[in-house]
Image (tube, coloured by chain):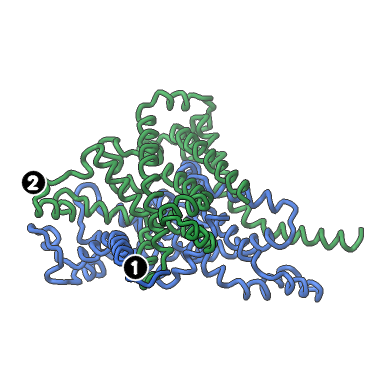
Chain colours: A green, B blue
Amino acid sequence: MNAAYSLDHRRQMTGMSFVAPTVLLIAIILIYPIIQSVVLSFGQSSIDGSEPYEFVGFAHYAKLMGDERFWNSMAVTFTFTAISIPLELMLGIGLAVLLNESFRGKGIARLAVLFPWALPTALNTLMWRWMYNADYGLFNAVALQSGIVDRPINFLGDEWLAMFSMVVVAVWKTSSFMALIILAGLQSIPRDLYEAGRMDGMSRWQEFTQITLPLLKGPILVALIIRSMDALRTFELPFNLTDGGPVIATESLSLYAYKVIFDFIDFNFGAAIVVVQFLVIFAMSLAYIFVLRTRN
Amino acid sequence: MTKRPRYGLYLLVIISVVISFFPIVWLILTSVKTTAGIYAWPPQYWPTPVTFENYWTIITQSPELLRYVLNSFIVGVGCTALTLVFGGLAGYALSRLNLKFAGFLMVGILAVSMFPPVSLLPSLFQNFLQLGLLNTYTGLILAHAGLFLPFTVWMLASYFATLPVEIEEAARMDGMGFLRIFLTIVLPLSWPGFVATGLIVFIFSWNEFPLALVLMTQNAMRTAPVGISLYPGEYAFPWETISTATVIAIIPILIITAIFQKQIVGGLTAGAGK
């Protein structure tokens, strides 16, 4: 053994020992439970381990395919994602362009748009639920007093209105996150590109569509994928805003899975739901990693 | 940039700021109204009189709401400390020590960071139940640390990569071990990275909902977002208490965000782009 080899060997051993605690904790908290969820979803068992595990094959998945409430929650989740993400993207780009300008009080403006993102979703949702309140909420107070409506609007009691109200909260909360990622992209665009554009007699709008947007493709894609994965697992928003109601009109996939597991105490069927959700989101995350790798 | 006043720009900025702020402002206004004022018709837009009665009531009669905030604080600090120690060591090894599987580990860590928390719930609940970790700070700290370690490793690894390598090489020549180099040279140089990462992880932990909901089933152990959400019970929703408790629970986050805005924004955008 030569000296260089033993030095590298020592380096590898030390490095592994530095990485080990992290890998171990991630394995215990993230990886093992996923594997266990897959195992649970193929069997029948008891929560406390008092009864032996019995393998049932695809029985829970077969039940899932015929479960209307499951398909409803898929539809709710995808509708919610499909409506809120484009809105967030448009507002996010607008905000980013705005915050990229130089003006007095910019620091405060940036802080203001950061707040909705930094606060807990669960508590944000409570704030909005209070404003949506049919009897004492701010929106109905304004609408009734100004004579726009003569009866209070039941924001959370109507199927489509409840979905709309939920989308508004999500857009309010996360447009700023989109904006921050896109803003970082904006700041990396060299200024002289715009000067060249100006010499060619481009308008501000042409500058935006022909210079800015193409160069923002990467950051926009990253923001879109991160937010889509977030929206697909949305949980505390419907939990606190509507509890999935009216009836099940806003019951997201995560919320349905939670109810099956902890309200109906059906761990094995619930595990099948979360495994399906996991596969959908994991496919998206692979797409994300692929996008990042091809970019670099 | 042009010198002429840009009223349109300011108008848009003001609209954005108002929309971002008004739910929070309305919440604070609600919390300083009397109960009669909250449910009054015509609605009270400005609290008359301004009263801190609701805050006093919470302090004297509902100490559990303060307990939630304390729980969040303990879990947040524990989780942040644990992720910074583990993630710092791992991030250093992965970015600096030419580990054989560094690339594979980094991508693997990124991939697991995207696991939806709800898919962990059936098994984590069952394991924690059987291990006696439900309703313990240790349990939720470990769960949150596992959840946010991937982010920490990526943040810190990319921070270490920006440091000049020469000092470490010189220290190697002097025969210093890697742990000593990390503790005496790398740590002092990279504290801004640790501060930014730690703040974001603390906010993540403070805000986390599904795991905190499921792993803390006793009222006295609940974190602030969960405790306040479940506080009302079935039918009556005491908005005077809820609004006040919510204000108390978001104040720490508002302060941290206001003071460390630059670090947090920098950390987040770097984390997302990597």
Q: Amino acid at mark 2?
A: Asp
Q: Quadrant of residue B96?
A: bottom right
User: In the figure, is residue B244 to the left or right of B204?
Assistant: left
Q: Secondary structure at mark 1?
A: helix
Mark 1 — on which chain does it sit? B
Coordinates of residue B17 in the picture (x, y in percent) = 31, 63
Q: Quadrant of the N terminus of chain B?
A: bottom left
Residue assigned mark 1:
B251
Residue at 61% from the left image edge and 71% from the top image edge: B190
Say few, some or many: other residues with alpha carbon within 10 Å of mark 2 (under 14 / 14 to 19 / 20 or more): few
Is A254 rendered above or below residue B147? above
Residue assigned mark 2:
A150
Mark 2 — on which chain does it sit? A
Q: Amino acid at mark 1?
A: Ile
Q: Secondary structure at mark 2?
A: loop
**In the rendered image, is residue B65 in sight?**
no
Coordinates of residue B251 in the picture (x, y in percent) = 34, 68
Residue at 59% from the left image edge and 53% from the top image edge: A25
Residue at 40% from the left image edge and 23% from the top image edge: A66
Is A199 rendered above or below residue A102? above
Coordinates of residue B261 in the picture (x, y in percent) = 44, 68
User: In the figure, is residue A108 to the left or right of B29?
Assistant: right
